[in-house]
Image: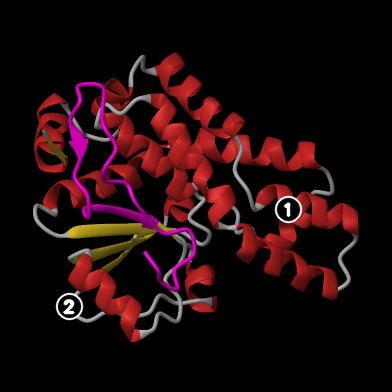
Amino acid sequence: MNTQITNFRDLGGVKNKEGKIVKPKRLLRSGHLVNLDKKTQTTLTDTFNLTRIIDFRREFEISESPDTPIEDVEYINLDLLGKMNAKNSSLADFAKLKSIEAVDKHMLGVYEDLILNPGAQEGFTEFMDYILANKNGSTIFHCFAGKDRTGYTSALLLSLLNVEKEEIYKDFLVTNTERKKANGELLQNYREQGFSEEQLESLATALYVKEDYLDHAFHLIEKHFGTAEKYAAECLNFDKEKVEEFRRIYLIN
């Protein structure tokens, strides 16, 4: 889709392990929805039947770059990091870490918290109920870059739709291509502000995703719960009946 939205895509069209297909134009992921022109707004509502936006960002992220309001589309802020009592982290904070190893360690901690932190579990419980309640329209969920909070959420949804891990990783890693231009512009901006090449290298690491991050997430779910379904049932109030309903709504033969 030719829109102004960075890192936008439809999770639909992929086959699951039983040969069923994730319904197109129902589950959409992206980066923030900032300064959308009328054409993009119309595409979202008319082509994708968008009825709900779920914004995972912190208050300071929203105040810096608020989503464009779209007529007749419900907007929900579901601050996952806030529910986790996570410290506010700007991009400049990542540059201060000064090593790729430090950034990787931080990011692995974020993915761990997204799964195991009780606040995150509370947030995803709300999120899954919103997804289940949207029986006809599409939902777009996003954070700032559509990278980690959004990337893990996509992996969770596709796992519960019984999609092969290979396809889940494929969707996860598309971010690195989709964000290349935007990331380059961000890095140039920080370079012009006087950030060192060492700091820019750390920042660049934080702007992309790695297979290791999703590996860590899947490993934690398997270690602590066995399967995504058991994790959903134990932590997200999303039991077998809800999983079956979710699949009825979002899968087609």
Identify the image quadrant of residue 171.
Answer: top left
Q: Mark 1: which amino acid? A: Ala
Residue at the spot 63% in from the left edge and 64% down from the top edge: 181
C-alpha span from label 1 to label 2: 37 Å
Provide the residue designation for mark 1: 204
Disc 2 crowd rating (10 Å Cα; few below 14, some 14-19, many 20+) is few
Secondary structure beneath dot 2 equals loop
Check if residue 10 falls in the magenta segment: yes
183 over 27 or under it: above or below: below
Horizontally, is 156 left or right of 17 in the view?
right
Q: Quadrant of the C terminus?
A: top left
Q: Which mark is residue 72?
A: 2
150 over 107 or under it: above or below: below
Q: Mark 2: which amino acid? A: Asp
Secondary structure beneath dot 1 equals helix
Horizontally, is 87 left or right of 159 in the view?
right
Magenta segment's dominant SS is loop
Q: Which mark is residue 82?
A: none
Horizontally, is 90 left or right of 144 in the view?
right
Q: Quadrant of the N terminus?
A: bottom left
Residue at the spot 26% in from the left edge and 32% down from the top edge: 15
The residue range painted magenta reads 1-29
Identify the image quadrant of residue 142.
Answer: bottom left
Q: Earlier in the sequence, mark 1 or mark 2?
A: 2
- In depth, the one of 96 and 137 nearer the eye is 137
